[in-house]
């Protein structure tokens, strides 16, 4: 058993003594955010006790996985003490009251700098928090730190000029995926049950698959994104969690419009899913076969899912929209950061800096052609859901590769966007804006996690989450673990 953390309320503050339940660290690592919140609300657990657990586990893992741009120890303990006093007074803010979380370091958190993985940013504290962060704080969550991201979240791996290499807690030699690298790694390590992420090409789902956790990209605009990004029409915010239940709870807490994000909206279609939803099974999305390791794990998962749904093999009705994504991403990042690159290229990620030159190769006609082809792709993907309620496929065609690498062995290192050459199952659904979630479906060769991806129609977030919860329950018998081994 892991170390036990005990907390006697009042020891440090001279108030009436109240004994909380002892909490074994391994029990904490296995618990979900909602479960911890319920136990805080009932008076069984102390928010300070939970913050101490989270900070201990994060610090213990940090030398090996480097998941945090900053651990906010003093602030977290101070905030936890406030949540504890509120709970004792019967003032529970919401279902995550006192629950430790982590936030990706591209989301402003009031009073703290937002570095975005870049040496070009400053230490100026944010004047206000991002919508997703402020809504989680409003539900009582306690932020223990800001998690690592590649520079300005531009790629699908976990290295940045500011924070170095983030590693996978299942094996520190492996890549955790990105760009929500630290969020995926810290949730998988068990330090926090919930972390925030952003996803403009797979940046929530890639680390979810590589790290064996849940990662949700909702419909574009369902969770407001602020500040805006240079690729606004691709950018989603979403949770990375230990369970689908927690992902659904976070989504409910943070969804809905914010005037700072003109794309954000409020839509709550019926959440019901047919008892046996008609699910399109896509074994090789866009005609790209998964690796043998992923195929084997996915096949085992399908056998467990057969009793809970009707699976109908199908193929996606459009080719891989790689050129469309490249046009949008290269021009957005290259032109959006061109002035920064001109001034600071020597201290920036060379791959990101290179986009400023590559962007100049696109004409205005090229860009509008990409928009036209995007519309064609989106229309084709929308038509799929006249035949199916949902789509089911692998999240990634491969499992995690070397932490230091930008591409897996044999990959296209010289491509304009090397990271999209090995993420063909994720970024197309940023082009279409449809909701998608990655759920752990087992461990492959060398105990490398793999994920299955559920994709829904536009605004079908609740249906995606409901079916993901069914899949999670069905797969529970086949999943060896929910968090990575402890150091």
Image: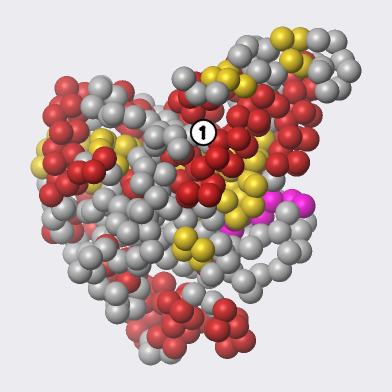
Q: In the picture provided, is 404 more to the left or to the right than 68?
A: left
Q: Secondary structure at mark 1?
A: loop
Q: Determine the residue positioned at 54% across, 70% down.
A: 161
Q: Which residues are magenta?
A: 105-111
Question: Is 106 part of what is drawn in magenta?
Answer: yes
In the image, residue 163 above or below residue 259: below
Local crowd size for mark 1, using a 10 Å CA cut-off: few (<14), some (14–19), many (≥20): many
Dividing the picture into quadrants, the one containing residue 136 is top right
- Residue position for label 1: 193
Q: Is residue 171 above or below residue 228?
A: above
Residue 426, quarter of picture? bottom left
Vertical order, 267 against 341 (above or below):
above
Q: In the image, residue 327 lies at what x, y percent? A: 36, 76
Magenta stretch holds residue 446: no
Decide whether the magenta segment is chiefly helix, strand or loop.
loop
448 or 41, nearer to the observer: 448
Residue 330 placed where, x, y %? 41, 77
**Relative horizontal placement of residue 461, taking residue 62 as reference (left or right):** left
Residue 102 spot, x, y in % from top left? 59, 43
- Corner quadrant of residue 318: bottom left
Do we see residue 67 in this rendering?
Answer: no
Q: Is residue 19 left or right of residue 176?
A: right
């Amino acid at each position: 058993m892991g170390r036990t953390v005990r907390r006697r309320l009042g020891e440090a503050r001279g108030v009436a003594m109240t004994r909380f339940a002892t909490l074994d660290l391994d029990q904490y690592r296995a618990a979900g955010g909602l479960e911890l919140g319920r136990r805080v609300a009932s008076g069984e657990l102390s928010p300070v006790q939970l913050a101490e657990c989270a900070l201990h586990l994060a610090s213990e893992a940090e030398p090996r996985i480097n998941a945090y741009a900053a651990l906010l120890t003093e602030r977290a303990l101070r905030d936890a003490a406030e949540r504890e006093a509120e709970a004792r007074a019967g003032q529970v803010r919401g279902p995550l009251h006192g629950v430790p979380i982590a936030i990706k370091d591209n989301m402003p958190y009031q009073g703290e700098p937002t570095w975005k993985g870049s040496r070009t940013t400053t230490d100026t504290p944010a004047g206000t928090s991002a919508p997703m962060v402020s809504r989680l704080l409003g539900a009582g969550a306690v932020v223990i730190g800001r998690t690592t991201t590649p520079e300005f979240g531009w790629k699908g791996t976990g290295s940045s000029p500011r924070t170095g290499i983030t590693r996978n807690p299942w094996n520190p030699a492996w890549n955790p995926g990105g760009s929500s690298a630290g969020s995926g790694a810290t949730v998988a390590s068990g330090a926090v049950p919930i972390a925030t992420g952003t996803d403009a090409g797979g940046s929530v789902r890639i680390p979810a698959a590589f790290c064996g956790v849940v990662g949700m990209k909702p419909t574009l605009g369902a969770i407001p994104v602020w500040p805006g990004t240079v690729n606004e029409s691709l950018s989603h915010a979403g949770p990375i969690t230990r369970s689908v239940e927690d992902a659904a709870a976070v989504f409910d807490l943070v969804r809905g419009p914010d005037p700072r994000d003109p794309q954000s909206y409020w839509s709550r279609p019926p959440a019901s899913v047919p008892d046996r939803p008609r699910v399109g099974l896509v074994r090789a999305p866009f005609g790209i076969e998964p690796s043998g390791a992923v195929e084997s794990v996915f096949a085992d998962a399908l056998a467990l899912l057969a009793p809970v749904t009707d699976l109908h093999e199908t193929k996606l009705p459009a080719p891989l929209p790689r050129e469309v994504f490249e046009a949008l991403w290269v021009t957005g990042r290259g032109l959006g950061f061109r002035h920064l690159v001109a001034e600071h290229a020597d201290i920036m990620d060379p791959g990101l800096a290179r986009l400023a030159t590559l962007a100049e190769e696109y004409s205005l006609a090229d860009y509008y052609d990409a928009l036209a082809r995007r519309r064609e792709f989106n229309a084709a993907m929308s038509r799929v859901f006249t035949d199916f309620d949902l789509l089911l496929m692998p999240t990634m065609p491969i499992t995690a590769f070397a932490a230091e690498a930008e591409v897996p062995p044999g990959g296209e290192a010289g491509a304009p966007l090397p990271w999209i050459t090995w993420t063909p199952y994720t970024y197309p659904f940023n082009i279409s804006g449809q909701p998608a979630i990655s759920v752990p479906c087992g461990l492959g060769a060398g105990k490398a996690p793999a994920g299955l991806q559920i994709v829904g129609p536009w605004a079908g977030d609740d249906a995606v989450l409901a079916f993901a919860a069914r899949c999670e329950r069905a797969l529970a018998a086949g999943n060896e673990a929910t968090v990575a081994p402890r150091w």
